[in-house]
Image (tube, helix red, strand yellow):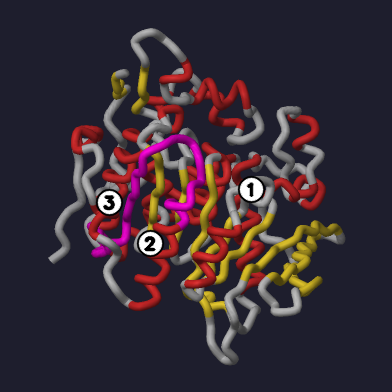
């Protein structure tokens, strides 16, 4: 297996007018440029905010360990409903709790063991099913018949952007709950759900911690770097744009078709998405054996995004954990997230292992750096 670099990563500090960002206050302008560029091309843009989002408590277990809310989004006389489940520790009156929000209610990675670990750390773990907003099926016609596209007819947003939109609507509701610390909300997801978590964290500045897990192409991966097996076996190479567009044509924005087999011509790469999270906490969890998700490429874009974090004086807030194994949202991944939430809550520095240099050779993936701010 070998890594191929199509082209070095573009410099996120170069503004549209050709000027280089040199002061921190200029980053706000550059951030808006990147947000429009990357989210529009890659994901078809974000769906609009609804006219109203409300949450109604549907049920609570006797000891209130599980609370289920109905989230209703209204726009133009239309509405969309989906459920949000909260698994809570024993609540103390007047106390606010940090919360981790997962959008993968369509899967079973959120086990009782994982829930117990969060709750034992006095952290609420919440989950919604992103497929209740945009169906996760191969038939593009069926996808466009999803509730989100009935709520907003004619929008160009792909599935990933629609799923990301769901995180924001959950946060709309969570901010209203008196026992939730809305200043310490983490969002996470696995694989395609990890792509959605990344986009949600890039588009919405409210999540304090953004944690995509094994998110690969269109997530934490890298369009310009790929892993290729010398025997040409697709099972031991990384996913490229052509694979994604063929298998899941509805996930990305339609403009991405213009870059199939031409990824080096993209005016951004995935480090731009990670940079949009700065200076909030970004935690990338991956598996070294998850070749299809391009773990070295994911680390390369993290190193590039770290230059933006360094520029903003927040270098210690962009983190990664690489475990052994393959494509899974493993208990270890969740444990690392819970540990970071605890560190943030207690004002402590993140664990040193999250700053480990996992793929030193990936430092050659870009040839620019941030300037020092005196």
Give the vertical position of 109 relative to 145 (above or below): below
x and y, in percent, of residue 131 in the image: 71, 46
Question: What segment carries the magenta color?
Answer: 310-334
Q: Which residue is mark 3?
A: 306
Q: Earlier in the sequence, mark 2 or mark 3?
A: 2
Q: Which label number is shown at residue 281?
A: 2
Name the residue located 71 percent from the left edge and 44 percent from the top edge: 155
Q: Which label number is shown at residue 130?
A: none
| Other-residue count near label 2 (Cα within 10 Å), few / some / many at <14 / 14–19 / ≥20 | many
Q: Which residue is mark 1?
A: 108
Number of numbered labels in the structure image: 3
What is the C-alpha distance between the residues marked 1 and 3? 32 Å
Residue 318 in magenta? yes
Give the vertical position of 236 relative to 127 (above or below): above
Locate the N terminus by quadrant: top left
Residue 355 in magenta? no
Which is in the foreground here, disc 1 or disc 2?
Answer: 1
Examine the rendering and report whether any part of residue 105 can be seen: yes
Left or right: residue 176 compared with residue 229: right
Which is in the foreground here, disc 2 or disc 3?
Answer: 2
């Amino acid at each position: 297996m070998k890594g191929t670099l199509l082209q070095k990563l573009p410099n996120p500090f170069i503004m549209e007018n050709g000027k280089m960002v040199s002061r921190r206050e200029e980053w706000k302008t550059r951030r808006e440029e990147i947000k429009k560029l990357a989210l529009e091309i890659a994901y078809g843009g974000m769906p609009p905010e609804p006219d109203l989002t409300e949450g109604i408590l549907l049920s609570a277990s006797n000891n209130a360990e599980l609370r289920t809310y109905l989230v209703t989004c209204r726009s133009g006389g239309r509405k969309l409903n989906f459920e949000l489940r909260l698994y809570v520790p024993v609540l103390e009156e007047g106390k606010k709790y940090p919360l981790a929000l997962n959008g993968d209610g369509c899967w079973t990675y959120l086990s009782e063991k994982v829930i117990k670990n969060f709750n034992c750390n006095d952290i609420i773990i919440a989950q919604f099913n992103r497929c209740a907003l945009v169906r996760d099926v191969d038939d593009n016609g069926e996808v466009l018949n999803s509730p989100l596209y009935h709520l907003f007819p004619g929008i160009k947003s792909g599935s990933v952007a629609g799923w990301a939109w769901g995180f924001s609507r959950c946060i709309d509701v969570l901010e209203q709950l008196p026992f939730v610390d809305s200043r310490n909300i983490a969002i996470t997801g696995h694989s395609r759900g990890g792509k959605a978590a990344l986009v949600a964290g890039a588009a919405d500045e409210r999540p304090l911690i953004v944690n995509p897990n094994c998110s690969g192409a269109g997530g934490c991966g890298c369009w310009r770097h790929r892993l290729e097996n010398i025997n040409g076996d697709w099972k031991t190479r990384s996913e490229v744009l052509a694979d994604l567009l063929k298998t899941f044509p509805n996930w990305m924005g339609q403009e991405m078709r213009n870059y199939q087999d031409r990824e080096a011509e993209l005016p951004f790469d995935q480090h731009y998405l990670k940079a949009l999270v700065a200076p909030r906490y970004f935690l990338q969890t991956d598996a070294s054996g998850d070749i299809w998700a391009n773990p070295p490429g994911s680390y390369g874009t993290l190193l590039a995004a770290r230059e933006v974090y360094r520029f903003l004086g927040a270098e210690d807030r962009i983190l990664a954990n690489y475990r052994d194994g393959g494509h899974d949202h493993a208990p270890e991944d969740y444990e690392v997230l819970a540990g970071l939430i605890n560190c943030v809550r207690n004002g402590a520095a993140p664990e040193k292992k999250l700053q480990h240099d996992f793929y030193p050779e990936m430092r050659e993936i870009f040839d620019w750096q941030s300037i020092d701010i005196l």
